[in-house]
Every structure is written in structure tokens, then in C-alpha cells.
Amino acid sequence: MLVTGKQILDHANEHGYAVGAFNINNMEILQAVIMAAEKENSPVIVQTSEGAIKYAGIEYFEALVHLAANKTKVPVCLHLDHGTTYNTIISCIRHGWSSVMIDGSHHDLKGNIAVTSEIVKVAHAVGVSVEAELGRLSGIEDQISVSEKDAIYTNPDEAVEFVNATGVDSLAIAIGTAHGKYKGEPKLDMERLDTIKKMLKMPIVLHGASGITEAQITEAVKLGVNKINIDTDVRQAFTDGVRKVIETKPEEFDPRKICGPARDLMCEVVASKMRMFGSSGQAWTL
């Protein structure tokens, strides 16, 4: 069933767990995510980046995800990840996305509040949830590239001001994660997370979680993270699955026999994340 991001994250916030938000780029990734959610009886957030929408087409994602959500009993949210333009965000809302992210983190605080407030006003008017970001993550996410020296950790006092001014439903904060693969082992600022959560008491989002150790993820969830974005780990599983078939069966040319094992491997990865985040067994019905 298709639900909003607010419905999913409010439940996670109330019950002390995190929901995985998994980026999709094709049908096999979507199938793997839904298969894992059903296997784990877990709510799930399926998210698309602007790059993925450009690659596959907004109508295709609308049809695929709505079909998947209507066929399953677990709560499914269709979310726009890192929306950077007004037109893209509005287009997603018109095509049935139940949650959108406005990424105004490249603006100063005043500018971020302005662009975020505009999206919140439009989205909330039609029952769509809004995620925003305060602070900047290093790394690359489709069109967004931030060097390590320009990454800024989220200021707790600014976070309170931002949420009060915009009315967002969830907030992505910068505490030491990065987009893409890590060069070394990241160390999250748990004290900053704890402070922000206690001040806001709302769903907190962690971006760039692929590659973070299980110990740090578990601690972050205990301290109040309710949405965790995963992209790189799923992409890697897809590539590993395809590569294995091609290397062991170079004569194979049937896409189903090449992509099928990759889909199964992605399902395993997604299911393991759900168990790690504590969302397994947390599916609820309306």
C-alpha cells in the first residue's frame, strides 16, 4: 500500500527504529526492494533521484512503483531524493510521489528556509510529505558534488530555527556521512546527532549510509535516526550479481538469467539493512 513519508517516519519515530530508503534505477532494483520488504515484513521507502528519473522516465517510475505498492500489504512510500528544482518536485507530486525532498543545503540558512518553505506549502496542500537538508555532505549524488572541505556539519540551533520556520516533516542532517564510496572509515558525530534529536524530537534522516559500520548505524538508530538512505550498496550488489554470471557463463545472453541473480543478491542486501535498522516486523496496516 502506498503511504506518505510522514506516516512511515512518524511510526518509526514513535517506536524507535529506522526505515531504509533505497534508490531505484530500474525494475529489478524495485522488485528486489519490495521482495525484501515483504520477506522482512518491513515498511519501506522507495526513492528516485533526479538522475534516475531522467534515465528511466517519470511515467515509468510512477507506473512501476504504484503497481508494486498496490500489490503488497507492507507500507511503501515513493520519495524524491535530492530534489533541486521546483519543476522536478512539482512534476513528481503530480505523478503520484507521496514524499519529496527539497535540497536547499547549498543555500545559506535564510535561502534554504525560503526555498524549503515554498515546497512545504505546495506539497502539504495536497498531502505530500517533505524532507529537507541542513548542512552539507561531501561526495557526489547525481548532479550534486561537494568537496570534503566544503562539507558543513549541521548546527543544532540552526536546525531548530529551520524546522520551526519551514514546517518540514523530516530533516536530513550532516554528521560525518558522505555520498558514494568512502575513502576511509567514517566516524559519525553521535553527540551532535543526540543533541539535534533531543531538541527537535522529529524524524531525523541519515544520508550516505552505504559503507557505515553496523555498530555506528545501530548507535545512530538508538539516538533517533528514523530514515537511512542506501544506494551504493545496492548498486554494488547489482553489479556483483551481473559480473558473476558473465564471468562464469560468458555464453549467456538471456537478460533474465543475467539480471535475475543480481535481483536476488540485491534482495539479500536490502533485507540485511532492514534487520540492521530495526524495521523488520514493523509493517503496519491502516
Image (cartoon, helix red, strand yellow):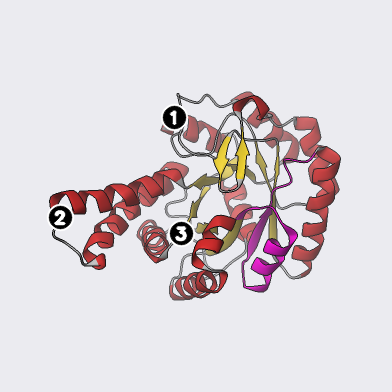
Q: Give the range drawn in magenta.
A: 81-107
Disc 1 marks a residue whose amino acid type is Ala
Q: Where is residue 31 in the image (x, y as percent from the top left)?
A: 38, 64
- Mark nearer the N terminus (2 vs 1): 1
**Sooner in the amino-acid sequence: mark 3 or mark 2:** 3
Question: The residue tagged with tag 2: helix, strand or loop?
Answer: loop
Amino acid at circle 2: Pro
Q: Name the residue under label 1.
A: 215
Residue hosting label 2? 250
Answer whether residue 153 is visible to the viewer in this image.
yes
Q: Can residue 49 be seen in this view?
A: no
Question: On screen, 24 above or below 90?
Answer: above
Magenta-span inclusion, residue 85: yes
Q: Does the magenta stretch include residue 113?
A: no
| Residue highlighted by disc 3 | 25
Count neighbours of disc 2 (C-alpha within 10 A) and say few if under 14, some if 14 to 19, many if 20 or more.
Answer: few
Location of the C terminus by quadrant is bottom right
